[in-house]
């Protein structure tokens, strides 16, 4: 089965998106860091790689589009003319040709600029050549704006076309608008074509499938055709004309004699004569629809003769009357059309040379008579006798055969499904002597003693096992009844246990709060005046003299020792004393030369926690609007050149 998968054609991006795709991919897939102190060969290779990669990306993208779109010269003539009707074949070829020209142009640009880069003697010159090459390639892509937009529209329409096999068994429905074509295809196939009481409801080709003689048949519903010259027909009508011209199918020409379609019988006959050349070499059936309103016999004799004259001279043509509303004659029309097409295809194969080639390779084997002896079929005597008596395959005989086949000799008791009604199972045993049916089973079979595999005390052992099991169950039931609860908790004990658990929980919470407070006290630090720290640093190395900083430090040590001696006696110390007493960390400023060094350390500490602080503010539920700028302009190191282009 030949089918064309137009849905596999890839999406065609716009010119702007094409440029962004190419430059973005170049930025992501190639190195981005280069320095002027590198060797000139390395710099040249860096920029040549970018130019070549851009050219390869453009070449691959355009080649994919050109290969996936159907070539008009390689597809079936039906699809060739259909695409010409829908999209204008010349416009389609021009658009694909423009893509091919741009592909060749980018290849040539890449070759030229790679040669120029081989002779560049500085990083700046290499970068300018790379910029010029990629700029000219992008300019070529931007010129494809119209062609890419047109091809994307063609792709979208191609994906919506029905899958029509031009070579399979096909029934094609044609005629004036609103004569019942879509109603018929809905009746015989699983298609769901829209049906409305006005003309041109069907604006394109619709395909349905049905089964006949275990074969799949294709049914095509074409748009309505009006009776005017070919040049005046629109795109909708030309789709039907294209299908009639190229598809090998059985044509069903529908006519409405009631006039409800809005066209007279003379107009429908005139249309048939106008498009008759499209029916040459194809089976033809003229379908008189809506016979529930008007039949062929209701017309005048002149009109009846005009309709019957349409099939004269056409081999195998028929006139069939149906009513899709009353579902009258629909199935007979389907069968007649299918048989007509099968016979036509068979005659065509017989007349074709290919049939002779296949026939010469076929050999039909036929049995040869061995001798003159007559070998008749064997019929049992009981069958012959039953046929003579007239009892063969009567109701009684059928019932007997049914019972023998199922071999039912045990039936369930309807009232109690757990019991079985046993019947004589040996009555139907087929033995050489009926007296053997009730004999005892022999003890010796094939020289072996059957009793060797049977325990004679099996019934006694089974009875003892059941008694032992029953006794064990009784003992377990007695143990369960005599078991007394050892631990029994009353309501008072439960209340006391609950109070204990609550006190433990309160104690844990209190300890947690106290620990947090002590940590906060330890975090408070003593801030020394910046001027005092500077003087301490300036006087280092000189003769030690008493200064304001020494007085301040000495006062701090005295306050600490005084607090340690009095804290044991008085627990209600002031907040300032508690703050200095709990501080075991070195005082800020110790080990630092001057205030400038201290400020620099504080700045470094803030910078270290800056990123974490920003990240901690944002949550996963926060609305984030990404930056829609091109990635190739804002990614990578930008130490060389400007940042507005790369």
Image (cartoon, grey):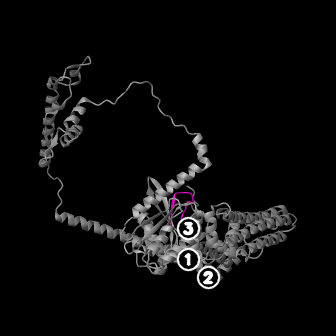
Q: Earlier in the sequence, mark 2 or mark 1?
A: 1
Label 3, label 1: how far apart the Cα atoms are: 26 Å
Compared across the picture, whether 516 is left or right of 82 comes to left
Give above or below for 91 relative to 357. Answer: below
> Which residue is disc 3 drawn over?
161
Q: Quadrant of the N terminus?
A: bottom right
- What number is the disc on residue 642? none
Q: Earlier in the sequence, mark 3 or mark 2?
A: 3
Label 3, label 2: how far apart the Cα atoms are: 85 Å
Count residues near mark 3 (Cα–Cα under 10 Å), then give few for <14, some for 14-19, many for 20+. Answer: some
Label 2, label 1: how far apart the Cα atoms are: 106 Å
The magenta region covers 159-173
Which picture quadrant has residue 464? top left
Does the segment drawn in magenta span residue 644? no
Residue at 26% x, 16% y: name it.
447
Q: How many marks?
A: 3
374 vs 495, nearest the viewer = 374
**Residue occupying the far top of the picture:** 447
Q: Is residue 111 visible?
A: yes
> Which residue is disc 2 drawn over?
529
Comparing labels 3 and 1, the label whose residue is closer to the camera: 1
Compared across the picture, whether 24 is left or right of 280 comes to right
Comparing labels 3 and 2, the label whose residue is closer to the camera: 3
Q: Is residue 646 visible?
A: no
Residue at 75% x, 73% y: name it.
140
What SS does tag 1 mark?
loop
Does the segment drawn in magenta span residue 166? yes
What SS does tag 3 mark?
loop
- What number is the disc on residue 227? 1
């Amino acid at each position: 089965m030949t089918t064309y998968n137009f849905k596999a054609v890839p999406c065609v991006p716009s010119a702007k998106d094409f440029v962004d795709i190419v430059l973005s991919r170049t930025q992501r897939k190639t190195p981005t860091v280069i320095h002027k102190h590198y060797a000139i060969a390395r710099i040249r290779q860096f920029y040549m790689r970018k130019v070549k990669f851009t050219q390869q990306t453009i070449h691959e993208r355009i080649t994919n589009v050109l290969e996936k779109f159907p070539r008009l010269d390689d597809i079936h003539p039906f699809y060739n003319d259909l695409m010409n009707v829908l999209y204008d074949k010349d416009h389609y070829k021009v658009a694909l040709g423009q893509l091919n020209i741009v592909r060749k142009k980018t290849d040539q640009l890449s070759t030229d600029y790679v040669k120029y880069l081989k002779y560049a003697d500085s990083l700046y010159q290499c970068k300018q050549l790379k910029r010029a090459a990629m700029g000219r390639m992008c300019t070529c892509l931007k010129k494809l704006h119209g062609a890419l937009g047109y091809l994307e529209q063609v792709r979208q329409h191609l994906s919506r076309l029905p899958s029509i096999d031009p070579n399979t068994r096909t029934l094609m429905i044609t005629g004036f608008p609103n004569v019942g074509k879509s109603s018929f295809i809905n009746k015989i196939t699983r298609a769901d074509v829209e049906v409305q009481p006005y003309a041109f409801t069907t604006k394109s080709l619709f395909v349905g499938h049905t089964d006949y003689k275990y074969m799949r048949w294709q049914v095509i519903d074409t748009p309505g055709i009006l009776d005017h010259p070919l040049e005046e027909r629109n795109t909708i009508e030309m789709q039907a004309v294209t299908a009639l011209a190229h598809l090998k199918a059985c044509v069903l020409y529908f006519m409405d004699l009631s006039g409800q379609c809005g066209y007279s019988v003379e107009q429908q006959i005139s249309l048939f004569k106008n498009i008759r050349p499209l029916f040459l070499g194809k089976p033809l059936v003229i379908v008189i629809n809506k016979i529930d309103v008007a039949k062929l016999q209701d017309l005048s004799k002149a009109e009846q003769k005009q309709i019957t004259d349409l099939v004269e001279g056409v081999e195998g043509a028929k006139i069939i009357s149906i009513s899709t509303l009353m579902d009258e004659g629909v199935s007979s029309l389907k069968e007649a059309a299918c048989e007509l097409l099968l016979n036509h295809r068979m005659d065509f194969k017989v007349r074709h040379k290919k049939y002779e080639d296949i026939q010469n390779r076929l050999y039909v084997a036929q049995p040869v008579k061995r001798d003159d002896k007559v070998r008749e079929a064997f019929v049992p005597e009981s069958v012959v006798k039953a046929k003579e008596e007239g009892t063969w395959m009567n109701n009684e005989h059928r019932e007997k055969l049914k019972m023998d086949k199922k071999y039912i000799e045990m039936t369930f008791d309807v009232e109690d499904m757990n019991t079985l009604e046993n019947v004589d199972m040996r009555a139907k045993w087929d033995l050489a002597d009926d007296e053997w049916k009730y004999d005892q089973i022999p003890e010796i079979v094939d020289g072996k003693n059957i009793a060797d595999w049977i325990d004679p005390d099996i019934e006694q052992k089974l009875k003892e096992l059941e008694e032992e099991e029953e006794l064990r169950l009784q003992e377990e039931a007695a143990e369960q009844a005599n078991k007394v609860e050892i631990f029994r908790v009353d309501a008072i004990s439960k209340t006391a246990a609950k109070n204990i658990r609550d006190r433990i929980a309160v104690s844990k919470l209190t300890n947690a709060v106290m620990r947090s407070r002590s940590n906060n006290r330890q975090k408070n630090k003593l801030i020394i005046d910046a001027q005092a720290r500077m003087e301490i640093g300036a006087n280092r190395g000189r003769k030690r003299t008493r200064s304001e900083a020494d007085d301040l430090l000495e006062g701090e040590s005295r306050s600490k020792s005084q607090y340690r001696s009095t804290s044991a006696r008085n627990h209600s110390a002031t907040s300032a004393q508690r703050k200095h007493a709990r501080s075991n960390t070195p005082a800020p400023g110790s080990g630092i030369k001057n205030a400038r060094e201290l400020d620099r350390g504080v700045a470094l500490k803030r910078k270290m926690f800056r990123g974490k602080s920003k990240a901690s503010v944002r949550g996963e539920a926060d609305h984030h609007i990404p930056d829609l700028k091109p990635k190739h302009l804002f990614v990578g190191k930008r130490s060389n050149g400007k940042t507005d282009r790369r």
